[in-house]
Image: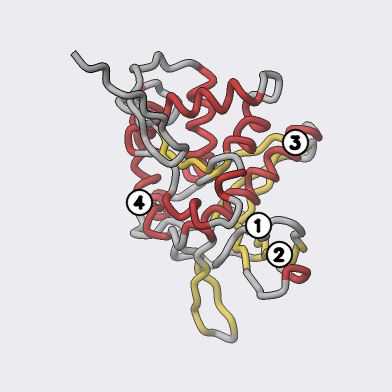
Amino acid sequence: METPKYHRHSRWEVADSHAIKIMPRDLEYLYRLFIHGPLSSAMLHYLVSPAVRRKETTERFKIMRRKPNCLVEVPKQSREAHNANYQPLMYQITYAGVQVLLLEERIPEEVAHLHFTLRQNYRTFHHDALTAYITASIELGGNEEGIKFFGWDYIFTHPKTPQATKQSDNPLRIPYKIDGNEKFLVPDALFAIEAKDGKTCFALKPTCTRSPSTRMSLIVHPTEISSPATSPSFKASSIKLTGVYRTCRC
């Protein structure tokens, strides 16, 4: 009987493997993808498991991606980068990954449902990856400074968040008025940070420009959580971001 030839799978192929036992660290990887969006294995490593070897994180994601697990996937668009074969792989959570978070009680059913509702706001992969990189960088920087990060799930499950907002056809839509005209802002991300003086919520709306030196991001700070029928007050500030958009196209 002829022995089948060994096939070495490329990093872009999904190989077969064995079913894994979900560990606490796996749930944290999945949760970061759940609240941020597509991230590289390098970013996930520093967010969740900086104390272990990078290779362990890389190998774990390989198993999580392979059949029959399929907890994460590599976005096809990430292969378009000129240096895609030499950079850490980008990952995004799958439906199976969300179900694992739900079954393991890492997220409530309400948040899982909201996750799929909010998917209507996703734009291109590169724009979503940019947004995810920004919020993940904020969380990572906060970890180093003792500032706690909270994702959109914290805001939408907060007792002060009205049911009308949660049940809206687009919970991210924020109404406001300019010169008496009602307009809407749909941010790409919501998050909160907790410092010594308490928690502050932010809405993030990245803006891409052609010049790498002038790429900016607008962070809007609503003074209080409001329903779609209520116009919140805003404090807006522009933050210059360097080295973030280098491989992103929007």
Question: Which amino acid lies under the numbered mark 4 shown in the image of this protein?
Answer: Thr
Residue at mark 2: 235
Q: Residues within 10 Å of mark 2 (few under 14, many from 20)?
A: few
Q: Quadrant of residue 98?
A: top left
On screen, residue 117 above or below 127 = above
Q: Could you tell me residue 177's position as x and y percent?
A: 55, 77
Q: Which residue is mark 1?
A: 223
Query: At 69% across and 56% down in the image, what residue appears?
Result: 244
From where the camera sits, is residue 159 visible? Answer: no
Kind of residue indicated by mark 2: Lys
Q: Which residue is mark 3?
A: 147
Q: Is residue 48 above or below residue 172?
A: above
Nearer the N terminus, badge 1 or badge 4? Answer: 4
Task: Kindly indicate the quadrant of the structure image that contains residue 248.
Answer: bottom right
- Residue at 50 percent across and 39 percent down: it is 33
Q: Amino acid at mark 1?
A: Thr
Q: What residue is shown with label 4? A: 117
Element under label 1? Answer: loop
Which residue is depicted at the point 39% across and 53% down? 119
For discs 1 and 3, the disc positioned in front in the rendered view = 3
